Structures are given as C-alpha cells and as structure tokens.
Image (cartoon, helix red, strand yellow):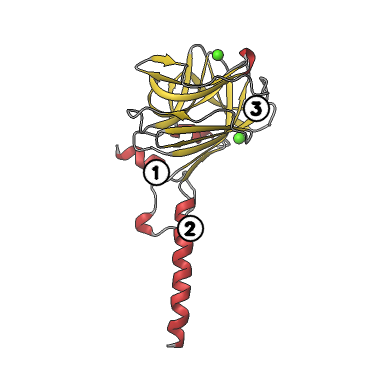
C-alpha cells in the first residue's frame, strides 16, 4: 500500500509533464541554417533562396524579383497561430501574410521604410485593399536593419508587434478568411527573413523537433501531413 501511495503522485507528475510538453511543442521553427528547410515552404511567386546575411552572418531566406514575392507555408487546416520572425528589408518593404488561401487571397502586414509606410492590407480575388485601418510611418525602422516582428492571429482579429511594441489596433478579418497558412511577402524588393517561429494548437512539429507526448498523440512532421493531402 505504501508503494501504491508513491506511484500515484509519480504517475500524476508524469501526466502533468506530458500535458505541458504536448501543449508547448506544437511549433515550426526555421533558422534556415539547413538548406532543406526551404523544402517545407511553397514559393507562390518570385525567387526565394537561402543565403548568408552580411549583417548577422547567419543563413536567412531571401526573396527578390519584380512584382509580388511570396513564400508560404501551411494550409486550410491552419486557423489561429502566432508567427515570430526577424526581418530586414534590403531595398524597401518586407511583410508577413496570414490566412493565406493563395497568392491572390490573404491578409498581411507590411512595412516599407523608404516610403515611410506601415499598414495592414488584404488581397481578395486579386484586389488589394489598403484601407483596413490606420496607416503608420516607418516606425523608426530603416532599410538594412534587422527587427523583431510578432503576428498574433486569433479568431477574427490579428495583432502585430514590432520590437515588442504594438503600433496599430488589431485588424479585423472577414468571416470568409477563417483559415489558411502564413507567408513572408513583399513587392518588388529584396527582403531577408530569419528565425521564423510559428506556434499554435494546429501547428505541427518542426522536422526533428523532439516532444514528450503520448505516442498516439504524437504530431506528424509537417512533411508527413502534406503527403497525406
Ligand atoms: Ca539563420
Ligand atoms: Ca516595394
């Protein structure tokens, strides 16, 4: 009986640990130090490759070309999530897209330091709408500077944080955009992105990410999920 009285708390502790780890370990992380990390992404438009960044001396993903440049990950199973990343516009704008259906249907936040503009916008059926909220200036950011961005998408709202500050009111998302992946995205400019962390209850584990979860609840690697489609 004495042994049993020990086993129960130990069992409870294990269960607690498993629950804790299984909640925090749903994440995708890309530091782009491994060339294969780009394979998990879909190039919707433009040229995207992993390069060495001269400021950070780290490998980063670079988008360049003319017109819309868009690198995406995720699908209609993705709903609410948080996206954190480091971004650097080399020539002007960089941005983060969410609830992405395709290159013509998504919401996004952009910052274009050279024209002193930051704003929410949407593209629906190929038509841009840049009047979703108050526009901002360059938020004190210049080109060739790395800054930290955090996007929180939950229900019918999204919030953006730039270097820990929230410069705008949350943007309202229309009902028909209640799911979809994320993307990094800019227009006609060269942008670098690094350390992209995507977390959320519906987000799979990074390839190789270890998790202490019961075997039947073990999340599939993103590659496995895609191959089931
Ligand atoms: Ca890196
Ligand atoms: Ca541009």
Q: Tell me where residue 32 appears, x and y as whole percent.
A: 56, 34
**Quarter of image, res 141:** top right
Q: CA distance from mark 2 to mark 3?
A: 36 Å
Q: Tell me where residue 58 appears, x and y as whole percent.
A: 64, 33
Label 3 crowd (10 A; few <14 / some 14-19 / many >=20): some
Please tell me the numbered disc located at residue 53. 3
Secondary structure category for the residue under label 3? loop
Name the residue furthest left: 229
Q: Nearer the viewer, mark 2 or mark 3?
A: 2
Q: Which of disc 2 and disc 1 is earlier in sequence?
A: 2
* Residue 54 to residue 221: above or below: above
Secondary structure category for the residue under label 2? helix
Label 2 crowd (10 A; few <14 / some 14-19 / many >=20): few
**Where's the N terminus, which quadrant?**
bottom left
Q: Tell me where residue 132 appears, x and y as whole percent.
A: 46, 21
Q: Residue at x 64, y 14 (%)?
A: 114
Secondary structure category for the residue under label 1? loop
Q: Which of disc 3 and disc 1 is earlier in sequence?
A: 3
Left or right relative to 141: residue 193: left
Residue that numbered label 2 is attached to: 20
* Residue 200 to residue 101: above or below: below
The reply to whether the residue tagged 3 has its Cβ within 8 angstroms of ligand 1 is: yes
Label 1 crowd (10 A; few <14 / some 14-19 / many >=20): some
Front position in the image: 218 or 148: 148
Quarter of the render that holds ligand 1: top right
Front position in the image: 18 or 52: 18
**Quarter of image, res 150:** top right
**Where's the C terminus, which quadrant?**
top left
Q: Residue at x 36, y 55 (%)?
A: 217
Q: Are marks 1 and 2 in contact (CB under 8 Å)?
A: no
Q: Nearer the viewer, mark 1 or mark 3?
A: 1
Residue that numbered label 1 is attached to: 202
């Amino acid at each position: 009986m004495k042994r049993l009285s020990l086993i129960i708390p130990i069992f409870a502790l294990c269960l607690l640990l498993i629950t804790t780890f299984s909640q925090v370990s749903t994440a995708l992380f890309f530091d782009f130090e491994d060339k294969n990390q780009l394979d998990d992404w879909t190039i919707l438009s433009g040229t995207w490759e992993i390069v060495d960044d001269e400021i950070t001396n780290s490998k980063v993903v670079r988008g360049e070309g003319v017109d819309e440049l868009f690198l995406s990950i995720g699908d209609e199973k993705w709903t609410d999530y948080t996206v954190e990343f480091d971004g650097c516009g080399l020539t002007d704008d960089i941005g983060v897209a969410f609830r992405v259906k395709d290159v013509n249907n998504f919401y996004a936040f952009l910052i274009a330091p050279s024209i002193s503009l930051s704003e929410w916008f949407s593209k629906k059926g190929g038509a841009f709408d840049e009047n979703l909220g108050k526009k901002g200036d360059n938020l004190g950011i210049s080109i060739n500077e790395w800054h930290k961005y955090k996007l929180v998408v939950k229900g019918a709202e999204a919030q953006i944080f730039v270097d820990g500050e929230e410069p705008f009111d949350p943007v309202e998302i229309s009902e028909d955009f209640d799911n979809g992946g994320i993307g990094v995205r800019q227009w006609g400019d060269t942008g670098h992105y690094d350390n992209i962390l995507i977390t959320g209850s519906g987000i799979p584990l990074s390839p190789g990410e270890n998790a202490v979860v019961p075997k039947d609840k073990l999340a599939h690697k993103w590659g496995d999920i895609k191959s089931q489609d």
